[in-house]
Image (spheres, grey):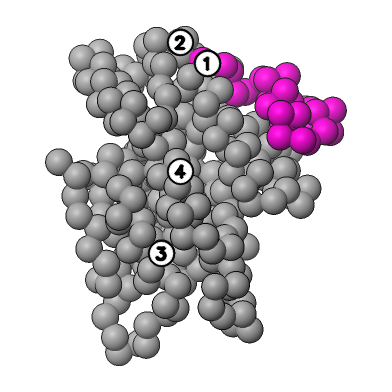
C-alpha cells in the first residue's frame, strides 16, 4: 500500500522528470499570460490529497495567472479489489490499529473544518477502487474541459467519497457527477463500462508515475520538474510556484529542490 503523506512527513522533493504530457512549457509566451502547467499526483481516497488540492486551487485563484493541471493517478492501494473493501478493514491495514485510524480522522477533520473542507468519515462504509474515477477524470480532460471545470470535477469526486460516502467505483455514481459538470452522462457511462481497457490504462499511468521515485502523495510537480510532496501549507505552495514562474535555473546554480524551504508542520 502506497503512502498518503502528511505535511510533517514530507518536504520539497528532488527534481523529477516531466510527467507524461503534463509539462508543456511555452517559451514563446512570457509574463502574466504564460500558462503555468502543473501535474498533481493524487488519489481520491487520500484525505491529504483532498486538503492539498483545495489549498493549491486557492493559491492559484489568488495569483490570477492562467494555469493548467494534469491530474495524474497514483493508486494508494494498487491491489484494491474491484469491489473495494470495508472501511474498517482498510483502516486496519493502513494504520495498524483502530485508535491510529481515529487519530488520523480527528486530525484531518480538524484541519478541514479550519479551511472549509468537509470530511465525514462516519459515512464511509467501504473504500472503493478509484480506477474508474481516475478514468473519468482522464476522459473529461480529453473533452476540452476547461482547467477550472476539470478541477471542479476532481473536487466533486473527492467530496462524494469523503462527505457523502458514495462508491466511486460505480459507473452510475460517476456518470451523475459528470453530468453535474456539464459532461454527457451517457458518454461517461460508456467509457466507464469498458472495464478492463480503462483499468489497464489507468494502472499503466499509475505505475509509470510510481516509477519516477515518488513514493507518496499528494505530490505537486511543475513543468520544470520541481516537486513538493505532502499536504503542504499555502505559503509553501506559493514559494514553489514563485520559483516555477522564474523558470529553470542554470546548471551551475543550486538544485531546484534546494531553492525552496517548505517548512514542516507541527
CA–CA distance between discs 3 and 1?
A: 33 Å
User: In the image shown, does 171 or 246 lie closer to the viewer?
Assistant: 246
Image-based side of 216 in relation to 157, left or right: left
Disc 2: which residue: 123
Residue drawn 40% across and 45% down? 55
Disc 4: which residue: 53
The image quarter containing residue 231 is top left
- Give the magenta part as a residue range: 164-189
In what quadrant of the picture does the N terminus appear? top left
Q: Tell me the element at label 1.
A: loop
Total marks placed: 4
In what quadrant of the picture does the C terminus appear? top left
Disc 1: which residue: 164
CA–CA distance between discs 3 and 4?
A: 14 Å
Q: Tell me the element at label 2.
A: helix
Q: Are marks 2 and 1 in contact (CB under 8 Å)?
A: yes
Instruction: Name the mark on residue 241.
Output: 3
Q: Are marks 3 and 4 in contact (CB under 8 Å)?
A: no
CA–CA distance between discs 3 and 2?
A: 36 Å
The image quarter containing residue 104 is top left
Amino acid at each position: 500500500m502506497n503512502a498518503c503523506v502528511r505535511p510533517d512527513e514530507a518536504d520539497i522533493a528532488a527534481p523529477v522528470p516531466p510527467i507524461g504530457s503534463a509539462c508543456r512549457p511555452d517559451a514563446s509566451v512570457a509574463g502574466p499570460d504564460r500558462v503555468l502547467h502543473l501535474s498533481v499526483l493524487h488519489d481520491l481516497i487520500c484525505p491529504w490529497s483532498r486538503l492539498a488540492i483545495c489549498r493549491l486551487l486557492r493559491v492559484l485563484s489568488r495569483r490570477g495567472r492562467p494555469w493548467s493541471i494534469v491530474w495524474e493517478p497514483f493508486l494508494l492501494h494498487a491491489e484494491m479489489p474491484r469491489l473495494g473493501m470495508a472501511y474498517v478493514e482498510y483502516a486496519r491495514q493502513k494504520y495498524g490499529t483502530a485508535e491510529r485510524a481515529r487519530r488520523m480522522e480527528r486530525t484531518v477533520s480538524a484541519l478541514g473544518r479550519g479551511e472549509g473542507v468537509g470530511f465525514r468519515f462516519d459515512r464511509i462504509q467501504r473504500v472503493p477502487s478509484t480506477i474508474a474515477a481516475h478514468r473519468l477524470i482522464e476522459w473529461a480532460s480529453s473533452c476540452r474541459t476547461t482547467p477550472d471545470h476539470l478541477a471542479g470535477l476532481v473536487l466533486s469526486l473527492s467530496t462524494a467519497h469523503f462527505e457523502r460516502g458514495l462508491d466511486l467505483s460505480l459507473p452510475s455514481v460517476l456518470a451523475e457527477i459528470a453530468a453535474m459538470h456539464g459532461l454527457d452522462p451517457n458518454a461517461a457511462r460508456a467509457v466507464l463500462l469498458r472495464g478492463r481497457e480503462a483499468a489497464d490504462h489507468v494502472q499503466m499511468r499509475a505505475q509509470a508515475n510510481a516509477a519516477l521515485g515518488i513514493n507518496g502523495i499528494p505530490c505537486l510537480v511543475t513543468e520544470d520538474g520541481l516537486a513538493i510532496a505532502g499536504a503542504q501549507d499555502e505559503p509553501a505552495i506559493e514559494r514553489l510556484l514563485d520559483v516555477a514562474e522564474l523558470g529553470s535555473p542554470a546548471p551551475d546554480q543550486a538544485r531546484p529542490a534546494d531553492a525552496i524551504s517548505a517548512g514542516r508542520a507541527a
